[in-house]
Amino acid sequence: MNSSPKSLQKNHPMPSREEFERRADESSAKCLEYVREHAERGSPASVLSCIDEFASTNHMMNIGQVKGAVVDEEIRKKKPATMAELGAYTGYSAVRFASLQCKVNADSHYYSFEYSPVFAERVREVVEIAGLSNQVTVYVGPFSEQYEVLRGKTVDMYFIDHEKTVYLSDLKLILASGTLVPGSVIAADNVVRPGAPDYLEFIENSPQFSAVRRVVECGHDHKLLPDLSIATFRG
């Protein structure tokens, strides 16, 4: 996601977690209204364009166009039959990646895990407006309580972009679930800002993974940071 609880301007104090969550909820609700009013139903491209337009002048926790293009590259290479995301917010990543997934692999499905019931309902509506309800299944609640729905499946690609403090614990659940096979890809956003240092320490030093960090523009200040981790499971 492009935005973070850290202020993007040095002279502004960092908001409290409560204030950050309030702003995130307010922006999400307004973004959904914007999509309802302006998006062409059944068009993922139109939905994404509307969210990008809204995010250009509002605080939004989306991966955005620049980082999104990096993950798009991985989807085109991998052609995942099964893809799962941890963290959905208002549905930008679900629409972006699921719409591309079904283009490169007609026999595919996208699983979206969102902690917040409020955000999950908004994701479902945004996905429906985009015409992707048959492609995307949204699960509500902590991934730690929902991941068993993937057991028995091979997940070709994961996208992680939720609470940074649980990146590592959820990665370990992914490993324990048996859903990875050699070649499975895990993309994780915001590993530097706001950061998931324990996740990076683990995945970059584990013999089970080959991991690289992609340098990308981050946030409204467009700072270049190695903020997107792409890891391939070795087995």
Image (cartoon, rainbow, N blue to C red):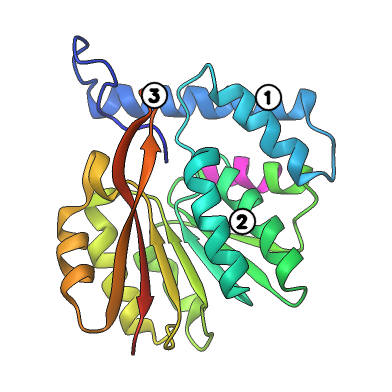
Q: State which mark lies toward you, 2 or 1.
A: 2
Q: Residues within 10 Å of mark 3 (few under 14, many from 20)?
A: few
The earlier-in-sequence mark between 2 and 1 is 1
Question: In the image, residue 56 lies at what x, y percent?
Answer: 54, 21
Q: Is residue 123 magenta?
A: yes
Q: Quadrant of residue 101?
A: bottom right
Left or right: 122 in relation to 71: right
**Which badge, 2 or 3, is on the more N-terminal residue?**
3
Residue at 52%, 66% in the rendered image: 84
The crowding category of the residue bearing disc 2, from other C-alpha atoms within 10 Å (few below 14, some 14 to 19, many at least 20), is many
- Per the image, label 2 sits on a secondary structure element best described as helix
- Indicate yes or no whether the magenta region holds residue 156: no
Name the residue at 52% across, 84% down: 154
Sort mark 1 into few (<14), some (14-19) or many (20+) by Cα contacts within 10 Å: few
Res. 66 in view? yes
The amino acid type, in three-letter code, at marker 1 is Glu
Q: Nearer the viewer, residue 34 or 43?
A: 43
Q: Name the residue beneath numbered marker 3.
A: 22
Compared with residue 175, is residue 92 higher up or lower down, i.e. above or below? above
Residue 118 visible: no
Amino acid carrying mark 3 in the image: Arg
Rounded to the nearest whole Å, what is the CA distance between mark 2 and mark 3? Answer: 27 Å
List the residue tagged with mark 1.
Answer: 33
According to the picture, the residue beneath numbered tag 2 turns out to be 97
Magenta-tinted stretch: 119-125
The residues bearing labels 2 and 1 have C-alpha atoms spaced at a distance of: 22 Å
Quarter holding the C terminus is bottom left
CB atoms at circles 3 and 1 under 8 Å apart?
no
Name the spot of residue 129 as percent of width and height, x first.
77, 42
